[in-house]
Image (cartoon, coloured by chain):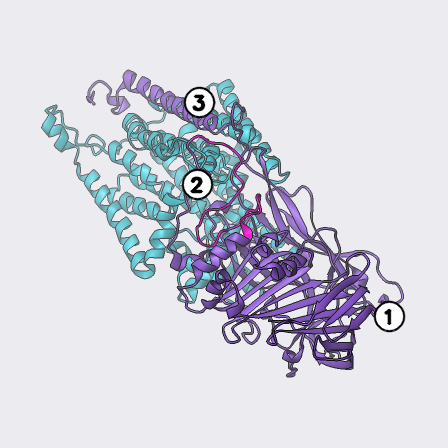
Chain colours: A purple, B cyan
């Protein structure tokens, strides 16, 4: 097991040498004001059986989880994904591995009581059905338990790939997941437990495995310290095979626009006698913008059945990032939409300039997943869809520097809700994670991004660009990065309530029957008085029926 | 009114109305993000583009029509310089608008020739209901293919009433291939077309000869021609596009869930049962009242008295009792109204006619209000709002249907001229 503990201090954060003390057997930090990343690499043999079974059947597995709390991304950890759990998965053999991963995913996701998610093996939809119905299980009739060999392809989606160099996962799954409690509670042993519990407060968690290294890497990122700063002690590992690397670093812009420069202190606990000063720089695909740019996501009220997502950004912050001049930069947003809400691919893929201009869109660049325009949510098997849209930016004016425009620039994306199952209140909530918004600047040259020790890939959207693309994230500004959209549904009450399914059934049945009989009665009257034959020859051709 | 003296004036005005709407539609499409052109037209033209490239029209999602439609619209896929491409794009709309006018012309011909209407009276009814009806002109110039159905039904009637069984059969086969529902007309026409209608009435009352007498040459020709054109068209399409053709054109309509809110009285129940909340499967029997009336009872009782009224009642019943009903379905019976209205009690008794119109519009308004609350305000108006509005609209339609049936029994003053 290898651990790497990295503290990243802001330029303006204070540091006293007494705050990090290295001895022969341990390293202690006290009151450290810094962001922190813990990265633990574990060999396949060291893992509990439950995980090993899944991983042994995987070619690649990448989990990305981000908190729905707002957090500042600090370089070099400036990349983002939408809040929730993203799974990128490539099975070793196409058939064998679905069941184990699905079982694991179920344990991760299922305990959240009111989660609406697509289970990956059984095709039932796990709504919180609180309405008691005699003899009726609220599992939709259209859902069939599919055969395990094909099941995983049913709820996962296959995203298109622009570049297979740094993202090769072939299946993708997403679910809204406010806490990873149920994942960390699977950890084994006291040491593991402490580490895992700490992850509960993390802003983002990455889990990576590939069959080449046969090692599992778990990374947790905390972008701000707990109250009073980080106070922790890292002991020299008991086994010689284990290792703890420690770094206390600051990040700054490098000499080249695509570079990040880092400097600070490094040590391997138990091996080094003192903290070693260091300074290094490397090209990084994820960059931060020199002036913080923010965006906010909202849905215009009332949302109805066709909510429009608005992404607002202060105009002043929409300046081209400081990417090399030979790169082409464009503002993008990457939407992760659960199956409850969807875009109309034909509406959004239009090239009509009037439509695009009215929404401040440039074009739909990529889309993947569930595209059905008509299906209700309970027959949709896949988790949802992803959309990469290029956004337009305000035309740069000459005097932009003298009078910064305080108004907002808003891009809007028309979306549609699926029908959800009935509920007791007549409403259900769709949880829609905020999309990520970023500049993508594509370079022609061959910068090798792989040497970055903090590189992060398999984010879903990164693979849709050329591998030599620099990304500049905008910062989401909001308390909670998940929007709750109210979905009107059929209102059904249990017990003695007025709104009951059987009343609808009975009412419809009675009306149709009465209507049917009324028309028959009228026909009978006609037949009685003038028969069924030709009117003018009535009486001559009285046919017996 | 002098205006109705001249067919040329009426048809020119109808054509001008459509031309104005076409030009206006082109202008709105070019200048507004909200398009005049119907979303279905984009589906047709996308499919036509696939066909032009030699691919299947079903490569376009939600293309649920016969490939014939995409074939006809291939000119819309022709690329060209700016003014030319606008014109080629509008080709389908022009075709649909011309179909409208042609359908109107056929109805006028029938009223004058077979129903012995004075030209002026025929023109007045057809103009009011169809030719000058802004809804009809709007739907076809927005690019909805329903107008094509109008001309097919009018042509079917024309061939039938002028006693051309083979032509009538061929048209029926084509119409059913185009959109399934016109099959109901086949039954009325078959029942209507007895030996007496062919002018060879027999006075034989023996049961056997009566049964044999059912198979008149006209009925046999009509049936064989209808089956031949229907089977031939489907065979050609199946050989060309295989299973997707069958699935999207026919099976889709049998297997779709229709859980979304619409005018049908079944819509709330279908939502409930599709989501797994219904205890009975009453909706599985929904085809029974609909088909018993449309296929058996209405043709049997009404067809021989007044073919067009029987067909109108069939269409009205089909739409009213259908599991799904959207506003385009109302266009289906509009083309048959000019035959019925002149003799109907809705016109003879203005109070009745106005009450029916007010109630029908009220039913629509109530439903649309609830639909607006749901769709745009996000209010949960499924129950009781949409549910009761749907049932009320159904009740109004059934009441009007009762009036049509009674009028059909009376036969009215419309009589088909003997040849």
Numbered marks: total: 3
| Residue B180 seen from this side | yes
Residues at marks 1 and 2, CA–CA distance in whole angstroms: 92 Å
Classed neighbour count for the residue bearing mark 3: other residues with Cα under 10 Å, few (<14), some (14–19), many (≥20): some
Position above or below: A511 against A228: above
Front position among marks 3 and 2? 3
Residues at marks 3 and 2, CA–CA distance in whole angstroms: 28 Å
Classed neighbour count for the residue bearing mark 2: other residues with Cα under 10 Å, few (<14), some (14–19), many (≥20): many
x, y (%) of residue A537?
Answer: 24, 22
x, y (%) of residue B341?
Answer: 43, 28
Identify the chain of the residue marked 3, using the numbered disc in the image: B
Magenta span: chief secondary structure: loop
| Residue B91 seen from this side | no
Quick one: label 3 or label 2, which is nearer the N terminus?
2
Q: Which mark is residue B399?
A: 3
x, y (%) of residue A226?
Answer: 77, 58
Q: Which mark is residue A382?
A: none
Position above or below: B243 against A503: below
Position above or below: B285 against A367: above
Q: Which segment did they paint magenta?
A: A109-134
- Residue sticking out furthest to the bottom: A446
> Pointer 1: what residue?
A16
Q: Secondary structure at mark 2?
A: helix
Residues at marks 3 and 1, CA–CA distance in whole angstroms: 89 Å
């Amino acid at each position: 097991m290898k651990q790497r503990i990295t503290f990243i201090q802001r330029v303006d954060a204070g540091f006293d040498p007494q705050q990090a003390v290295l001895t022969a057997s341990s390293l202690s930090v006290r009151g450290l004001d810094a962001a922190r990343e813990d990265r633990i690499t574990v060999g396949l043999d060291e893992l509990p059986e439950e995980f090993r079974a899944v991983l042994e059947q995987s070619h690649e597995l990448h989990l990305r989880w981000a908190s729905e709390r707002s957090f500042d991304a600090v370089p070099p950890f400036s990349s983002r994904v939408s809040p929730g759990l993203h799974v990128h998965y490539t099975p070793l053999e196409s058939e064998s591995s679905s069941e184990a991963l699905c079982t694991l995913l179920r344990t991760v996701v299922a305990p959240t009581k009111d989660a609406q998610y697509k289970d990956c093996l059984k095709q039932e939809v796990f709504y919180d059905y609180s309405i008691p119905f005699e003899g009726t299980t609220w599992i939709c009739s259209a859902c069939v338990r599919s055969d395990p060999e094909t099941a995983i392809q049913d709820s996962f989606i296959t995203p298109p790939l622009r570049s297979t160099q740094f993202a090769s996962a072939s299946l993708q799954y997403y679910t809204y997941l406010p806490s990873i409690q149920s994942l960390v509670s699977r950890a084994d042993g006291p040491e593991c437990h402490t580490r895992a519990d700490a992850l509960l407060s993390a802003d983002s968690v990455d889990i990576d495995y590939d069959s080449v290294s046969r090692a599992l890497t778990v990374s947790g990122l905390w972008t701000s310290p707990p109250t009073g700063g980080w106070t922790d002690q890292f002991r020299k590992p008991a086994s010689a095979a284990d290792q703890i690397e420690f770094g206390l670093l600051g990040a700054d812009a490098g000499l080249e626009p695509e570079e990040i420069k880092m400097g600070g202190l490094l040590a391997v606990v138990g091996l080094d006698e003192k903290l070693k000063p260091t300074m290094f720089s490397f090209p990084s695909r994820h960059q931060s913008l020199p002036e913080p740019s923010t965006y906010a996501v909202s849905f215009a009220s009332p949302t109805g059945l066709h909510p429009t997502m608005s992404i607002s950004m202060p105009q002043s912050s929409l300046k081209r990032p400081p990417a090399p001049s030979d790169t082409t930069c464009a503002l993008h947003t990457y939407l992760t939409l659960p199956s409850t809400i969807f875009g109309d691919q034909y509406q959004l893929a239009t090239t009509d300039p009037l439509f695009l201009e009215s929404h401040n869109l440039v074009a739909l660049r990529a889309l993947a997943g569930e595209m059905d325009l008509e299906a209700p949510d309970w027959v949709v098997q896949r988790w949802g869809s992803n959309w990469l849209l290029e956004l337009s930016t305000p035309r740069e004016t000459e005097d932009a520097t003298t009078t910064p425009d305080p108004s907002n620039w808003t891009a809007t994306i028309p979306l549609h809700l699926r029908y959800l199952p009935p509920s007791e209140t007549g409403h259900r909530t769709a949880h829609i994670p905020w999309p990520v918004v970023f500049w993508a600047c594509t370079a022609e040259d061959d910068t090798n991004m792989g040497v970055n020790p903090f590189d992060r890939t398999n984010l879903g959207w990164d693979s849709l660009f050329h591998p030599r693309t620099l990304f500049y994230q905008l910062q989401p500004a909001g308390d909670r990065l998940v929007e709750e959209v109210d979905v009107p549904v059929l209102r059904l009450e249990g017990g003695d309530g007025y709104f009951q399914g059987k009343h609808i059934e009975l009412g419809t049945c009675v009306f149709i029957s009465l209507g049917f009989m009324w028309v028959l009665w009228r026909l009978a009257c006609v037949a009685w008085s003038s028969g069924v034959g030709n009117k003018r020859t009535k009486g001559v051709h009285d046919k017996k029926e | 009114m002098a205006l109705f003296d001249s067919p040329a004036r009426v048809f020119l005005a109808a054509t001008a109305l459509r031309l104005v709407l076409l030009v206006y539609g082109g202008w709105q499409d070019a200048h507004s993000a909200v398009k005049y052109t119907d979303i279905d037209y984009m589906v047709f033209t996308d499919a036509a583009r696939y066909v032009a490239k030699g691919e299947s029209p079903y490569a376009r999602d939600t293309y649920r029509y016969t490939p014939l439609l995409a074939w006809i619209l291939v000119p819309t896929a022709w690329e060209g310089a700016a003014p030319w491409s606008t014109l080629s794009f509008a080709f389908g709309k022009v075709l649909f608008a011309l179909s409208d006018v042609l359908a109107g012309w056929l109805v006028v011909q029938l009223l004058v020739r077979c129903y012995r209407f004075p030209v002026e009276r025929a023109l007045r009814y057809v103009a009011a209901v169809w030719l000058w009806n802004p809804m009809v002109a709007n739907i076809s110039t927005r690019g909805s293919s329903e107008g094509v159905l109008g001309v097919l039904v009018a042509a079917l009637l024309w061939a039938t009433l002028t006693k051309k069984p083979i032509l009538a059969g061929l048209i029926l086969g084509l119409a059913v291939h185009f959109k399934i529902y016109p099959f109901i007309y086949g039954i009325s026409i078959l029942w209507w077309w007895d030996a007496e209608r062919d002018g060879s009435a027999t006075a034989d009352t023996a049961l056997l000869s009566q049964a044999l007498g059912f198979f008149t040459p006209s009925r046999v020709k009509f049936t064989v021609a209808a089956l031949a054109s229907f089977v031939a068209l489907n065979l050609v399409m199946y050989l060309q596009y295989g299973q997707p053709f069958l699935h999207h054109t026919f099976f889709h309509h049998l297997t779709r869930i229709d859980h979304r809110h619409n005018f049908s009285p079944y819509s709330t129940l279908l939502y409930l049962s599709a989501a797994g909340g219904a205890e009975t499967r009453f909706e599985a029997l929904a085809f029974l009242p609909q088909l018993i009336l449309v296929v058996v009872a209405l043709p049997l009782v009404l067809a021989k008295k007044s073919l067009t009224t029987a067909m109108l009642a069939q269409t009205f019943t089909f739409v009213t009792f259908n599991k799904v009903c959207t506003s385009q379905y109302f266009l289906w019976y509009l083309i048959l109204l000019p035959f019925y209205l002149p003799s109907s009690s809705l016109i003879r008794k203005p109070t009745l006619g106005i009450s029916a119109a007010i109630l029908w519009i009220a039913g629509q308004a109530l439903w649309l209000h609830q639909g607006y609350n749901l769709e745009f305000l996000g209010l949960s108006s499924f129950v009781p709002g949409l549910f009761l509005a749907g049932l009320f609209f159904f009740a109004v339609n059934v009441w009007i249907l009762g009036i049509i049936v009674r009028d059909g029994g009376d036969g009215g003053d419309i009589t088909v001229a003997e040849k």
